[in-house]
Amino acid sequence: MRFTKMEGLGNDYVYVNCFREKVYDPEILARLVSDRHRGIGGDGLILIGPSARADFNMDIYNADGSRAEMCGNGIRCLGKYVYDHGMTEKTEFTVETQAGIKRLRCILQDGRVVAVCVDMGRPDIGAAVEMAVLPDETVDFVRVSMGNPHAVVWVDDIYVCQMETLGPEMEVHPMFPNRTNVEFVQIVDEDHMRMRVWERGSGETFACGTGACAAVAAGIAAGRTRDSVKVSLLGGTLDIDYDRQNETMYMTGPAREVFEGWTDIY
Ligand SMILES: N[C@H](CCC[C@H](N)C(=O)O)C(=O)O
């Protein structure tokens, strides 16, 4: 099976072009290819396929094999792949996901995609909640859905935030029937935040596009940020812009192809 390794701010996925390859059990394949010692290595698997409702279809599976509704860094790389590999001549096109149809606008340099702006849709913000975590502590967070679930935790310093314990504990807390991604967010000022993320099904990653959108949505709702925010993650910076007019979040960031390969891993 041929594959392509791609990354957005270090959030890396193994891509399979399902216009050419047949994948029978993506949950098993995701676990096999994501293994950084016995497999190709990545935060998960992304399948590029046809869609009856959009130009392309994206299916994303986390490193543990669980299927996710959407992936911000992943969809930017899909946009780069389909343009650079001549599967479309359009620089603006649509991608069907389990979180609805997303519109992408590719940013070119020397004829190749270097960055993509994605219409991430309307964030769905829940109330601020308090959660009991062990040992007899509580943590305040805000639920935000970008099609996939997020819990945004405000911290004073992302490098001193007990992420290694709080992340996995909150991911599987019974409050989240489908588990959740967890963002630890430090407000720098009203148009800049720093963030680390514990991803559902993948653990800590270098970046999370849907998570960055969720964090900005929570920041705007709490009156802590303006509508356009730079989100600094371990892997780099995303530009997140909220359009109040049409209640839509836009995410702009880089996309990179690392290598192509062939594997008989399954
Ligand atoms: N772990 C996420 C999927 C990947 C999202 C992230 N990598 C992004 O860039 O949005 C979930 O289970 O909802």
Image (spheres, rainbow, N blue to C red):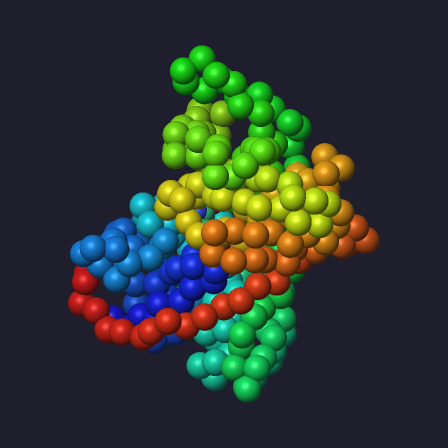
Q: Residue furthest right?
A: 245
At 21% from the left edge and 69% from the top edge, which residue is drawn? 263
Q: How many marks?
A: 0
Quarter holding the C terminus?
Answer: bottom left
Q: Is residue 192 visible?
A: yes
Residue 181 picture location, percent across and down? 48, 40
At 57% from the left edge and 82% from the top edge, which residue is drawn? 109
**Which residue is nearer to you in this view: 235 or 68?**
235
Q: Is residue 110 above or below residue 192?
A: below
The image quarter in which residue 92 lies: bottom right
Q: Is residue 177 visible?
A: no
Q: Is residue 152 left or right of residue 174?
A: right
Q: Is residue 57 left or right of residue 259?
A: right
Quarter holding the N terminus?
Answer: bottom left
Residue 139 picture location, percent across and down? 53, 23
Q: Residue furthest top?
A: 136
Q: Is residue 22 left or right of residue 168?
A: left
Q: Is residue 239 above or below residue 2?
A: above
Residue 206 picture location, percent across and down? 44, 52
**Which residue is nearer to you in this view: 238 or 40?**
238
